[in-house]
Image (cartoon, rainbow, N blue to C red):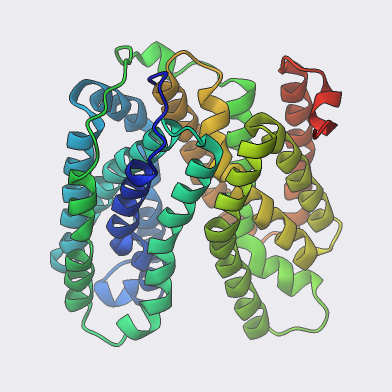
Amino acid sequence: MNNRKDPNFQPPVYAALALAFSSFGDAFLYPFLPLHGKNLGMTVAWIGTLLSINRFARIFTNAILARACGIYGFRLVTVVAVLLAIFSTAGYAFASGMAAWVLCRICWGLSYSVLRLSAIAYSLDHDRQGFSLGLSKSIQEAGPMITLIAAPFLFQLNVNIVFLTLAVASLPALYFASMLPPKFNVTTPFSIKRFLKFPSAFNLLTFFSAILIEGILVVTIGVLLLSYSDNISILEASILAAFYLGYRRVCLIIFSPFGGWIADRYGLERVFVVSFALFLAGLFLLTSGWIEAGAIIIFAFYSVLSALTPGAVSSTRELPVEAVSENATWRDVGAAIGTLAGGLLLASQYVLISILSGTILLSILFLYYAGTLDRPFKYWMTWR
């Protein structure tokens, strides 16, 4: 990154808006495919594959696309990524076979990889880095939230009209991407050896957190509520699960900028460490059987961590964009593995035990990471 920080919020806001508008089609697929995929000739296995294949595609392309952004500039690559996103959304309307669906999902995976990296990169260049990251994350999540709110109305329309409408609604993303200032970063050539190296302590935190929260907990929260809440039906558990998943999105929109503002005031690393400790407390509360209270705490502080992670990891390397890309890859790997694991645990009696085991491992990693920091632990408790 350049040493000079930009006091203008326009670039990070525009980059986040480009991602928010581009995400309409992907966001609609999550409530649409599980309910209507069979009408399109899809098996359950194919539905799960289509919803996760974009993550697997990003695992192998994050580093390469970061290199492309460094060479050709973030504005140009972001514009291309937006065009690819619009193409994939419109493609869902015309896809007549699994090969076409897979191609559209891979296109979206590549597009999202660039758009996410672009939003982070412009936020890291701001002089109020913490708030900029939080604001960017909040704006990004507004796109999927709008789509989920509109989903019940869209279900009543012809599927082809829906996806074409969402593609047209994504067009403002082109304007926001084209208005971004030119931005280049120094990157090193892609190396398969560096790609396969063992993750750092920080990336391990990201990896296991994604497995637990973005994978296992998101998939199994309905089962947990049904098993550990008193006298509720399957329908009530489903409604509660939808509420908590919606609450998770709201937390990302509201708490991300608030956490960033706190980070600017008290220090990004300090707020990250304290938030992670409270996040772990929520996990232990959940695994003790307090599902509702644990979920409220977990989703609130995980939203802060999601916003601040790019800033925390970028401060540890000479090439911040590569560090962010590498961290995003481990997050994608964790979320993909966690989603598959969560599906396998749906019929298991050991969901809470699995989450508890992961929480203990995550706590050990967190203590190890805290021990690698330059400042003594008492620093984190000295707020002024």
Q: Name the foreground residue: 226 vs 174.
A: 174
Residue at the front extreme of this rendering: 7
Q: Is residue 141 left or right of residue 96?
A: right
Q: Is residue 142 visible?
A: yes
Residue at 72%, 40% in the rendered image: 276
Q: Is residue 99 visible?
A: no
Q: Name the foreground residue: 320 vs 261.
A: 261
Q: Is residue 206 left or right of residue 361?
A: left
Residue at the bottom extreme of this rendering: 156
Q: Where is residue 219? Give x, y as percent.
A: 58, 60
Residue at 26%, 71% in the rendered image: 41
Residue at 81%, 84% in the rendered image: 231
Q: Is residue 95 left or right of residue 225?
A: left
In the rendered image, the quadrant that contains the N terminus is top left
Q: Quadrant of residue 370?
A: top right
Q: Where is residue 171? Give x, y as percent.
A: 18, 60
Q: How many marks?
A: 0
Q: Where is residue 287? Give x, y as percent.
A: 81, 54
Q: Is residue 339 above or below residue 230?
A: above
Residue at 86%, 25% in the rendered image: 378
In the rendered image, the quadrant that contains the C terminus is top right
Q: Is residue 229 above or below residue 48?
A: below
Q: Name the foreground residue: 231 vs 202.
A: 202
Q: Where is residue 355? Give x, y as percent.
A: 73, 49
Q: Name the foreground residue: 220 vs 316.
A: 316
